[in-house]
Image: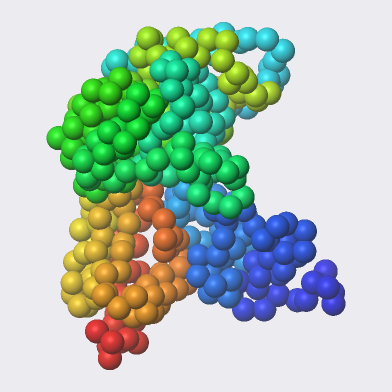
Amino acid sequence: MPDRHHPRPTGPYGRSEALLRRALAIIPGGHHLSGRPLLSPHDSPMYIERGLGCRCWDVDGHEYIDYFMAFGPHLLGYADPEVDAAAVEQLRRGTPLSLNHPLHVDFIERLLARFPGAEMGAFFKTGSEATTAALRIARRATGRRRVVRCGYHGWHDWCLPVESFVPRGLEKEVLEFQASEPESLRALFIAHPDQIAAVIIAPEMMVPPRRPLFLTLMEITREHDSIFILDEVKTGFRIKPGSMQQHLEIEPDLTTLSKALGNGWPVAAVIGKRQIMRHGAGLHLSATYHGDTAAMAAAMATLDILDREDVVGHVWRLGERLIDGLNAIAAAHRIPAVAFGEPLPPMPFLRFTHPDPAVNDQLRTTFYTQVIAQGVLFHPRHLWFISRAHQPEDIERTLEVAAGAMACTQARHSGLL
């Protein structure tokens, strides 16, 4: 019951705001980073109570067509009954167990069969763990320390080398390049001869992804006896015909996987060439929960569904329709905005493009406030995800809401356009 410490909620997101006030007193910042406000806490929800299929409900009772999908794990939709049943059945057998489990072998074999060129693998719980492990294996395999990165690869220290809260010197060991500028990568190898263990790239950093450029990046990497790592934590299992490397027809040395792999259950993996992965033997990659079999059972069930249904084609088609529809709506209302796949249709996004940053911010805020208020959960700063649970009618309803929001944006800011 509300009291003087927790006042009675008011406004459309009153309960969310009340929870946030409580959280600010006990949680640093009041929320985890992925849960930061979309707009302001008064104009958008902060707390989601439940999800089912492609919909979620916030603590104030509002229903949304959800395009976050928890930032990507729910390729099949929230609370998929087949996936969750497989995990629950495994939970009843006890997990994690004291030693190894047959499912550890089955799980890695199943992944290797899906990725040409992959011969060995190791399992983890999160994408951050997988990318960190891939670099550790690469360092041991090459005897070198430096690495080169492009994209978001997680929250560990090496991913944030210039921040004041990580150990000094990481910025000298973790270098960055531009995905669309191969010469920026070549320059790093010239500047640091025989010192770079690996190059890791998240394919969404190249929009649109271009096979010739990826081939060039791989060629430069291998010319210098370094290891090429494709971070498919976001793109794996949702890009035709199943992953970015298959779409581009390339074979990286190592691949990192997570997110859609477990459809909401925490599981990750590093897979790759035997001559490199074998250096993981005896390497400290251990954590108490890496051997958890419930999430692996969920992943196996997810792969079963992907094998028998055209999930990838479904999310691709719906993503194309959403992108095309949003671009047509923006053009019809003369709003400077562009929808695109980041990097391909199953991972769409809408970016406002007015040259004046202040005007751009106003347009973006008005549009996203309107769509969220009408029951469409778009993220204003992060790419979105289409799931198997989304249906054509959900996309059409989303476009109807977007058209109304664009009209409102045009009317409210006509003097700025």
9 relative position to 265: left or right? right
Tally the marks: 0
Query: Which residue in the rendered view is the most extreme toward the bottom?
Result: 415
Q: Which residue does the image show at 26% across and 43% down from the upper left?
A: 184
Q: Of residues 276 and 4, which is closer to you in this image?
A: 276
Query: What is the x, y in percent for residue 178?
Result: 29, 46
Q: Is residue 246 visible?
A: no
186 relative position to 53: left or right? left
Q: Of residues 81 and 120, which is closer to you in this image?
A: 120
Q: Is residue 2 above or below residue 281?
A: below
Query: What is the x, y in percent for residue 4?
Result: 85, 77
Quadrant of the image for the C terminus? Answer: bottom left
Q: Of residues 67 and 361, which is closer to you in this image?
A: 361
**Quarter-wise, where is residue 46 in the image?**
bottom right
**Quarter-wise, where is residue 340 in the image?**
bottom left
Q: Is residue 366 visible?
A: yes
Q: Which residue does the image show at 41% across and 32% down from the upper left?
A: 147
Q: Is residue 358 above or below residue 178?
A: below
Q: Which residue does the image show at 27% across and 33% down from the upper left?
A: 190
Q: Which residue does the image show at 42% across and 61% down from the upper left?
A: 381
Query: What is the x, y in percent for residue 161?
Result: 50, 45
| Picture colour scheme | rainbow
Query: What is the x, y in percent for residue 400?
Result: 31, 68
Q: Is residue 77 above or below residue 97?
A: below
270 relative position to 311: left or right? right
Quadrant of the image for the N terminus? Answer: bottom right
